[in-house]
């Protein structure tokens, strides 16, 4: 007994110590993730410019699959056991998180679609609303992903082919002989090339126009060796591109080969200037060198339009350019790069790697918020090595033959001032984005009116799916009950009376239907455990969608238990098989509790966290007052309140926070009294003081509730370990039971789960 107690004490204390350390590390990780989210909110990168994920917290299980499959860092993170959008501006719109979420809790959509006036109004066929025959494809539709652009091009090409065939009445595109083209494609980027290939596949008469002198569109203007994420895609008439990424040069080479092989009618160097309808209702597409007449037009011109200019003296000098194609051409140069996006940062790093270059990167904001995670890491390394000089909050004032004048905002000890910098300079790269071609598109018949867009259902919480799961469980249980009721005359007998019954060979565990039910139960257990392999990132096992596997995980768990019940002939005994049966029952119960009750607590904690973010944002806005005394008061109030929140939410312990419930009011009162006295001394109006104190109370209360929900989640987290240990015990018992049955077979009077 003493040995047992000693070993038990060591095990219990060891588990408790491990749990405490693990729990503290988890809190540190969550604190760091929330700090990143707060920083993204301040920088304006929390929300995406185009596509971004929306998370249904009522369904999110906290499995972390979305975080694992996202190709970008810090777009999604797990906070309070559920996914949170930390840096939405980095979302590339690949939608891997949406596809892989096992419970459908993530939707990747366009941000603020109901209010935005920079997204065209299109039909499901990508046709401009109000202008029949005019289609848009690719980045101009506000979808920047290359795969999406290719899909758009194929969709437009197929739709035009369908309409031409319907108009001809002969199923092909050769019915017209009036010299009017079936289609004009504007742009030879991914969308334009895909549309052209699809048009040729259907035998359409078409021409493709592009302002550049080679295929690729925006991709062709990327820096050398830039990696282009594509996901596996398929080009008409060419086939599948199986790799996940290609360098710019590799992708352009593939496209050039396709253009040459298929002899696509591409006319380079033609700059699109607009279109109109002629008297016959056909489109007349104008370029700077001519015009083309067609029944349908596909605009695949991107969103960048013409490069954005700074509007400063000297911008027209020959040393100023708006793109970088080959950094190797610039060596031993003094270079200024202006911009804060991926293109600007990548150009600066590429130039800094060349011999003898001195590179300065100027950005008008206080921090980067649109660059990708891997770009940010490379930039940090370049800065550490001193290859790049970074100047935030700076603006170009003038560009001279050998110099550049910058204006820089400085801040120190609550003082703000502006100073001028003069840089010795040989080359200037202005990468401040492009002027979107909205005016050109509107003149061509494209509307950006939100009221004309297809109505989309608002994204609302869909619930945990408990009703559907209960319905499935009810149906399966009802079927099992009907089976048991059909054979009630056998199942109702005592065990000793069953061998004499006519149905004994059919229903007993070791023979007939009873044995088959045991086999089905075993198969369901195997499928149920295979879900763990599909979900784990450690295994290259990706058959079927994770959502389907999650649904089957629930269904196979219920079905395994019901089949085991009938396999045991409704009478499990005190044997290894019987113990396996009860372990399976316990596994089913703990799994159900873990799936539905455990999901409620992190959802509540994240809801409080979102509320707290709102309060922090309001405190920050109050601290932006133009009056110096009011600004100092609000900044001090913000500091005191956030310090109080910090001590309650992260720095305490579970027991300490329980005790803090009684002392929290005292601490809050002390802070509020100090703030009120400071406001009176500084002459702050009573209304502003009271508004600040009200926000402080709300912030403190919300932080305390979030902390307590997080503590409760930590306690409930042990439930999953219980579920897993029961699963391990059940598998062991089932294995022993199967071994026992195979070895002893008919000689076992217990049989099955009996």
Image (spheres, rainbow, N blue to C red):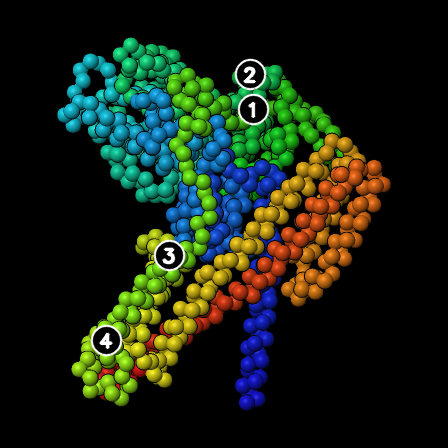
Q: Looking at the image, which is closer to me, 422 or 563?
A: 563
Relative side of 294 to 2, left or right: left
**Is 439 situated left or right of 573 in this image?**
right
| Quadrant of image for the N terminus | bottom right
Q: Nearer the viewer, residue 328 or 595?
A: 595
Q: Which residue is mark 4?
A: 487
Quick check: marks 4 and 3 in contact, CB under 8 Å?
A: no
Q: Does the CB distance between marks 1 and 2 fall below 8 Å? A: yes
Q: CA distance from mark 2 to mark 4?
A: 94 Å
Q: Is residue 510 left or right of residue 25?
A: left
Residue at image point 67% right, 62% down: 657
Say which of 213 and 327 sits in front: 213
Q: Position of residue 128 (x, y in %)?
A: 36, 25
- Residue wearing tag 2: 317
| N-terminal label among 4 and 3 | 3
* Separation (CA) of disc 2 from disc 3: 67 Å
Mark 4 vs mark 1, CA separation in Å: 87 Å
Label ID, residue 428? 1
Residue 184 falls in image quadrant: top left
Residue found at the very far left of the displayed protein = 170
SS under mark 1 = strand
- Tell me the element at label 2: loop
- Label 4 vs 1, first from the N-terminus: 1
Dot 2: few (<14), some (14–19), or many (≥20) neighbours within 10 Å? few
Pick the front one: 229 or 479: 479
Q: Can residue 183 be spotted in the picture?
A: yes
Would you name the residue on which mark 3 appears? 468
Q: How far apart are the alpha carbons under marks 1 and 2?
A: 9 Å
């Amino acid at each position: 007994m003493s040995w047992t107690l000693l070993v038990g004490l060591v095990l219990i204390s060891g588990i408790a110590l491990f749990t405490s350390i693990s729990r503290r590390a988890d809190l540190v990780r969550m604190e760091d993730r929330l700090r990143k989210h707060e920083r993204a909110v301040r920088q304006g990168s929390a929300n995406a410019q185009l596509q971004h994920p929306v998370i249904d917290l009522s369904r999110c299980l906290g499995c972390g699959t979305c975080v694992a499959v996202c190709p970008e860092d810090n777009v999604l993170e797990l906070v309070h056991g559920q996914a949170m959008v930390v840096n939405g501006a980095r979302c590339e719109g690949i939608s891997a998180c949406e596809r892989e979420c096992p419970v459908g809790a993530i939707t990747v959509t366009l941000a603020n679609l109901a209010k935005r006036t920079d997204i065209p109004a299109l039909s499901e066929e990508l046709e401009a609303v109000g202008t029949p025959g005019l289609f848009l494809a690719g980045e101009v539709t506000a979808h920047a992903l290359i795969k999406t652009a290719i899909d758009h091009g194929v969709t437009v090409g197929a739709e035009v082919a369908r309409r031409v065939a319907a108009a001809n009445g002969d199923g092909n595109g050769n019915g017209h002989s009036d010299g009017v083209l079936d289609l004009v494609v504007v742009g030879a980027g991914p969308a334009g090339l895909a549309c052209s290939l699809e048009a040729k596949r259907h035998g359409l008469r078409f021409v493709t126009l592009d302002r550049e002198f080679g295929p690729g569109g925006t991709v062709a203007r990327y820096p050398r060796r830039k990696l282009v994420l594509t996901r596996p895609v398929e080009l008409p008439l060419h086939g599948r591109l199986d790799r996940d990424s290609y360098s710019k040069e590799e992708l352009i080479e593939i496209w050039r080969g396709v253009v040459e092989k298929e002899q696509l009618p591409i006319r380079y160097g033609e700059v699109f200037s607009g279109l109109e309808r002629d008297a016959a209702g056909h489109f007349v597409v104008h370029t700077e060198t001519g015009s083309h007449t067609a029944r349908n037009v596909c605009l695949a011109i991107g969103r960048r339009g013409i490069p954005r200019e700074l509007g400063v003296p000297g911008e027209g000098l020959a040393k100023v350019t708006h793109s970088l194609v080959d950094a190797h051409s610039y060596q031993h140069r003094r270079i200024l790069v202006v911009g804060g996006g991926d293109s600007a940062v990548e150009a600066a790093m590429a130039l800094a790697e060349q011999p003898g270059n001195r590179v300065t990167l100027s950005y008008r904001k206080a921090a980067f918020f649109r660059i990708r995670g891997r770009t940010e890491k490379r930039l940090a390394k370049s800065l550490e090595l001193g290859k790049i000089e970074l100047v935030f909050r700076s603006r170009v004032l003038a560009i001279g033959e050998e110099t550049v004048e910058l204006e820089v905002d400085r801040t120190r000890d609550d003082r703000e001032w502006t100073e001028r910098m003069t840089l010795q300079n040989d080359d200037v790269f202005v990468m401040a984005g492009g002027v979107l071609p909205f005016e050109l598109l509107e003149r061509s018949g494209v509307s950006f009116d939100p009221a004309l867009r297809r109505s989309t259902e608002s994204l609302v919480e869909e619930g945990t799916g408990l009703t559907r799961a209960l319905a499935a469980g009810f149906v399966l249980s009802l079927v099992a009950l009907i089976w048991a009721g059909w054979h009630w005359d056998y199942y109702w007998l005592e065990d000793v009376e069953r061998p004499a019954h006519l149905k004994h060979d059919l229903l007993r565990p070791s023979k007939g239907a009873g044995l088959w039910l045991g086999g089905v139960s075993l198969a369901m257990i195997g499928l149920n455990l295979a879900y763990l392999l599909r979900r784990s990132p450690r295994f290259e096992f990706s058959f079927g969608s994770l959502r389907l596997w999650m649904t089957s995980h629930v269904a196979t768990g219920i079905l395994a238990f019901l089949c085991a019940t009938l396999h045991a002939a409704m009478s499990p005994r005190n044997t290894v098989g019987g113990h396996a049966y009860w372990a399976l029952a316990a596994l089913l119960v703990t799994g159900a509790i873990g799936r539905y009750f455990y999901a409620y607590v992190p959802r509540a904690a994240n809801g409080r966290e979102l509320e707290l973010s709102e309060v922090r944002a309001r405190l920050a806005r109050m601290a932006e007052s133009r009056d110096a005394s009011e600004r100092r008061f609000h900044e001090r109030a913000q500091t005191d309140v956030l310090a109080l929140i910090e001590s309650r939410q992260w720095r305490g312990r579970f027991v300490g926070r329980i005790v803090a419930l009684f002392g929290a009011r005292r601490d809050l009162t002390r802070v509020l009294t100090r703030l009120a006295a400071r406001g009176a001394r500084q002459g702050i109006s009573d209304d502003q003081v009271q508004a600040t104190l009200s926000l402080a109370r709300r912030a403190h209360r919300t932080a305390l509730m979030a902390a307590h929900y997080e503590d409760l989640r930590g306690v409930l987290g042990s439930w999953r370990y219980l579920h897993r240990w029961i699963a391990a015990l059940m598998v062991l018992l089932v294995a022993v039971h199967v071994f026992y049955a195979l070895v002893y077979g008919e000689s076992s009077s217990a049989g099955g789960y009996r």
